[in-house]
Amino acid sequence: MKFQPVIGLEVHTQLKTGSKIFCGCSTTFGSEPNSQTCPVCLGLPGALPVLNKKVVEFAIKAGLATNCIIAHHSVFARKNYFYPDLPKGYQISQLEEPICRKGWLDIQLEGQEAKRIGITRIHMEEDAGKLVHGDVPGLDDGSGVDLNRACTPLLEVVSEPDLRSSDEAVAYLKRLHRIVTWLGICDGNMEEGSFRCDANISVMPVGSDTLGTRAEIKNVNSFKFVKQAIDYEIQRQIALIEDGGSVVQETRLFDPNSGTTRSMRSKEEAHDYRYFPDPDLVPLVIDADWVQHAHKELPELPEHRRQRFITELGLPEYDAEVLTASRGVADYFEECVAFHHNAKAVSNWLMSEVTRALNDSGAAIDACPVIPSQLAELIKMIDKGAISGKIAKTVFEEMWKNGGEPQAIVEKRGLAQVSDSGAIEAIIDEVIAANMAQVEEFRGGKEKVLGFFVGLVMKASRGKANPALVNELLLAKLKVQ
Amino acid sequence: MKITVADVEYVARLARLALSKAETELFAGQMDAILGYVDKLNELDTADVRPTSHAVPMENAFREDAVNPSIGVEKALANAPDRVDSFYRVPKVIE
């Protein structure tokens, strides 16, 4: 029997606010344990939560960018359970009236049609604290609780079970990751847990319209692990069914070391969260004006920009995709093009030299030492024939290391391209005189030797000779008997 | 009976309460009486009434996104029964 996997994802994105969702404690990552806490996020008796307005603004942005309906009326609810990282004994979340509903995102796998993935809902909630096991001296047989993360704002984005493979799941996640980082509402740092995913997975016989029993895999925090976890889980469920067994509805944990998932016994107890509206938080009412205002404040979204790069700037699809991977790259690109209207050349430079230098130094595009006007100027100099493409790379390295305008570097280091045919001819004459054997070979019909001569001439000119001119003059001289 | 002994045992387990058999039976009777009383509301036609989540007619209470000083590790841990360094220490939680 052939099986069809069915996957839905729940993504938790940590919002880039300065303070927590219901109190003024800082959300900075990596501080001393419990140093960013107060009566509200410690769940002390009598403390009252007050909603951070920015969380609502971010949620509206996320909703609009994923084609959701923004709820006019929404309510916070308490999700009750006991766990040492949850000081109040309940998590403030949203259940029946989330802030956003019924959205979608399009994904596209290579060589396939675009596919629309439904988004059931997006809701606001607070994060729990962090548990530490073993790696603190003196902890021995206990666990440590750090409540700095408790009450940090999260958006949970719940997809419809529209995904049919691990590749589709990863494509969807990447699209969502790009949107939240593009909007500037989440830093997207998966290692620090700012963007993490739970996957609901089931399998059913191909052609069936009855969903199988699903297992939920918790907290997977890299694209690679999501793919591994889903692939493993699909195979596990199919093997189970083929052996005459059946899938149990349970929560499972992915182990990156073995690439497998295992049952989480601690969460086996039936979930009964006894949700009810939180009486400490008044309902949220978002009117049309607010939504309209948020709409106006949205940046041009990646998908729209990608299309525009193709239609307006004439870039190939591949380039447009790469250049809209992040808003920083897209902005940098467009700034360059504003200075020098050669989109394809700017694109080439961004995808090769600039990307390589950024990767080597580990810097982000917004910290790029070569600013857009300088890169544009450098490319302009190539286009005008003032320097060769090869010399431009040397100039770029210099700009990267020590800063400075390309023109000044070219002048200071005497790198300007030599297009004076007299000077080039003089070099050619020397080279020819010193390599008569190769000249004979060329004249005997071995035209490949031309490359050998071009190399020598370029070397003798220290890369500055205009390559097109060198070719032209060399051919003329070599052909003359 | 709206509330049975089994219901009380279930809710007590969720709330981590250890009730004696006598308490369980006592609470089952009391809770049943309470729900029975509230059940009178079902005699009213509430088809057009929106479920009430809040008793006070108020909406949109916000704070701006500004960081305020926290209370500090020592104060945060002052009432903790057990600690290690700056962590609360709890019985081992194993996943």
Image (spheres, rainbow, N blue to C red):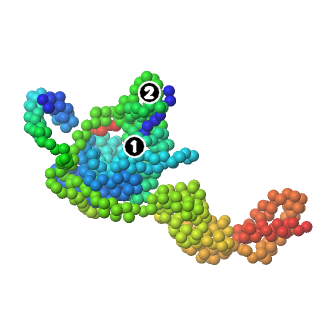
Residue A425: x and y in percent read: 80, 73
**Height in image: A413 above or below A368?**
below
- Kindly identify which numbered label has been placed on residue A378: none
- Determine whether, in the image, residue A22 is placed left or right of residue A230: left
Residue A447: x and y in percent read: 83, 59
**Residue A282 seen from this side:** yes
Q: Residue at x 22, y 59 (%)?
A: B61
**Height in image: A73 above or below B67?**
above
Pointers 1 and 2 in contact (C-beta within 8 Å): no
- Determine whether, in the image, residue A299 is placed left or right of residue A438: left
User: What is the three-letter code of the residue carrying label 1?
Assistant: Glu
Q: Chain of mark 2?
A: A
Q: Residue at x 8, y 38 (%)?
A: B37
- Determine whether, in the image, residue A61 is placed left or right of residue A441: left
Q: Residue at x 45, y 54 (%)?
A: A178
For mark 2, give the secondary structure.
Answer: helix
Mark 1 neighbour class, 10 Å CA radius: few under 14, some 14 to 19, many 20 or more: some
Which one is nearer the viewer's eye here, B28 or A287? Answer: A287
**Quarter the C terminus of chain A occupies:** bottom right
Q: Residue at x 41, y 24 (%)?
A: A245
- Kindly identify which numbered label has been placed on residue A160: 1
**Residue A22 seen from this side:** no
Residue A148: x and y in percent read: 29, 52
Residue A426: x and y in percent read: 80, 74
Q: Which residue is mark 2?
A: A240
User: What is the three-letter code of the residue carrying label 2?
Assistant: Leu
For mark 1, give the secondary structure.
Answer: loop
Q: In the image as oriented, which residue stretches furthest toward the top?
A: A244
Q: Are marks 1 and 2 on the same chain?
A: yes
Which one is nearer the viewer's eye here, A397 or A304? Answer: A304
